[in-house]
Image: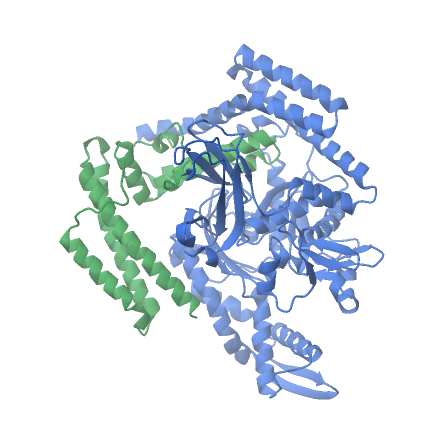
Chain colours: A blue, B green
Amino acid sequence: MALIQISEPGQSSKPHERKLAVGIDLGTTNSLVASVRSGQAAILPDINGKELLSSVVYYAKDKQIIVGDEAVPHKISDPLSTLSSVKRYMGRSLDDIKSKESPLHYEFVETDSSVPRIHTQAGDVSAIEVSAEILSVLKERAEQTLGDELTGAVITVPAYFDDAQRQATKDAAKLAGLNVLRLLNEPTAAAVAYGLDKGSDGVIAVYDLGGGTFDISILRLNKGVFEVLATAGDTALGGDDFDHVISEWIKAELKLNKSLEKSFQNQIVKTACQAKQDLTTELSTTVTLDNDGQTLTLELTRDQLNSLLDPLIKKTLMPCRRALRDAQVELDEVTAVVMVGGSTRVLRVRDKVGEYFKQNPMVDINPDTVVAIGAAIQADVLVGNKADDELLLLDVVPLSLGLETMGELVEKIIPRNTTIPVARAQEFTTYKDGQTAMSIHVVQGERELVSDCRSLGRFSLKGIPPLVAGSARIRVTFQVDADGLLHVSAREETTGVESGIEVKPSYGLTDNEIEKMLIDSMEHAEEDVAARMLHEQQVEANRVLEALAAALEDDGDMLSAEERAAIDTAAENLIKVNLKGNDREIKNAMEELDKVAEVFVSRRMDSNIKKAMAGHNVDEFDG
Amino acid sequence: MTSSESIGLTQNYFELFSLDVTFDIDSKNLSDNFRSLQQTVHPDRFANASDQEKRISVQRAAQINEAYQVLKSPQRRARYIIELQGIVFDDQANPVMDPMFLMQQMELREGLSEVKSNPDPEAALDKILAELKTSKKAILTKLAEQLNTPDNADLDKASQLMHELQFLDKLQHESEIIEEELMDSL
């Protein structure tokens, strides 16, 4: 990929070579992979023609790992080693999980790091590793179907996913050997899938009601740019709650005892879910239960169902109101409403949402696949396959990021719904003479008390130059990148010490942990991992060199003779090392080149900013 | 610890967007220019580039987002213009307020405290939010008179208006807390 891309968007250095990229919807219940082929985005099915992959992984005694539908039956025979819905555990500490799930579905094991592991008969695994197994299957499916190695993937995450959950998703992809082009919010992906088909500008509301969660996003589409204005939602509301109220109604009608056998209880929930689905086409359905040989029947009409569901549906409309308010958009400005998630198949949901937004919601694309389709379209754009495409997604931070201050209060640094990427700086000082370290507690959430927000972790700053108390000025920058991931960097302003200050989060996996997991997951362990690391570094080095060559050809005149000579020397060194060095040596040579090329890259970027604005000057001063 | 501040740019935000420094701006022009700038620097344009380019692109895109948010919001834009004139705006200051303005504030606050006991709390809250909006608009119109020609602006007057806006913001914030409580109580 050429550096020149910024002035001629999307042009690949080898124009005839189409890069393979996929969109992956890593779902709680099902996962999908999609790709754009001959201009059309489509789901890639498995060899049996099945599109959905059950997000279930079975760890057998003989260490065999089975992913997908074949793993599902083991839920009965080997419930503790058959892991499903692990998306709920992504980025969560054991305490978080315990507070949400009671009793626990699996045997959790505490670890030294903040990432808990689940005990199975084949060993202990983290939710990240389980997700990586699912991603690996999808990656393999895509490579077999498309016939070559993938350049990269866009992976979708719920809009409300916090930093730790996003980081965990990215770690899982890394573990599966995927190059993550972007983490994309699910509702944004859905809007892309619809928006491009319709090609119309306006304000879009994406209403996403899944099995266990609800979220609403308000986006503005203008000449190919999707700007997310606001998102809101409820992480504990979904189709499962629908089934629950129907089950409770069945129990009340049949005057069933509160304390039922687990299997009978499961049967009721399953029947309730079936009745809900039947009533999307029928006006009335018969509920039939088998209680120890005794057959119980009950009539449920669509009207009765509607009155049961209305309070729950109303609960989803409040976040809609909040999102519109945050977006500063009036109801009548909304030009389209997109429905995502299996629960939007319920007719009453469509009716009520239509009533609220005063228009018929769009339901043309299968709500189960729409997210993966949108992700595939975005992936295709990101790898540069569409030379003149204008699609650009501007997403937001879903939850405010803040710091703990005196009295356990939260000071917001980046408010929710701020467009990403975003960077904010804050100054701190030392309170003791000679203090060389300090810790910053970062939280995510809207509440004022630290204990009511989600603790992302403590970032420790070390290597602060020893000064008199209160005289050090440590400028800490909080940056959220386009994936919604937080990066913290620090700099002592009076002495200018930057590199010396080490910032380390207390959550997520370290590179060493990922490396160790990779080793654990491979048979020929260390050689394999070393080979993979070397290969990755070589690919990156080639990418850097290719980009540099193109950039020098176009803008070499931006450099003085000395600057040019320094870059050439470092580049020649990298070429040499890349042929015979190990991964560390290549990495070092790349870092050297980065250092001398920094000024060049910045200068080009700024020159392009000026160029982008050049055409606009004229109009303005005339008008 | 000082208050959070944005990452600095060498140009001021108006220059970055090729706009004159005035309060009234052509919002279409602003958003068109924002789009062109992001099309140039956004990390999505560098998904396949080197890590170094990615890093610099994230920095620039963040700066452009920040500038856009400031210019897009009339209130933040007003404050930014005042600050460009070399005035350090003090959030903590306790200026003398116009008695009429204070009266209106008290009435609104009273109304807000009675929202929850109203039979239709949502409608009652909507009414207050609408009133806040109208008041804000009126103040912004007065700010525009001052800040459309920043060189000749009465900056004391403008700062006073900014403080009035902050009062309204506080009320708005409290209304939103009540709104959240109404949502939670459903």
The residue that appears at 25% across and 54% down in the rendered structure is B134
Q: Is residue A243 left or right of residue B96?
A: right
Q: Is residue A397 something that shows in the picture?
A: no
Q: Residue furthest front?
A: A433
Q: Position of residue A97 (x, y in %)?
A: 60, 61
Q: Is residue B157 above or below residue A446?
A: above
**Camera-side residue of A429 and A148:** A429
Q: Is residue A182 above or below residue A230?
A: above
Q: Position of residue A241 (x, y in %)?
A: 57, 70
Q: Is residue A159 something that shows in the picture?
A: yes
Q: Residue furthest right?
A: A62
The residue that appears at 76% across and 39% down in the rendered structure is A148
**Camera-side residue of A473 and A81:** A473
Q: Position of residue A581 (x, y in %)?
A: 75, 24
**Camera-side residue of B20 and A252:** A252
**Camera-side residue of A123 and B15:** A123
Q: Quadrant of residue A108?
A: bottom right
Q: Quadrant of the N terminus of chain B?
A: top left
Q: Position of residue A240 (x, y in %)?
A: 60, 69
Q: Quadrant of the C terminus of chain B?
A: bottom left
The residue that appears at 50% across and 71% down in the rendered structure is A312
Q: Is residue A175 above or below residue B179?
A: above
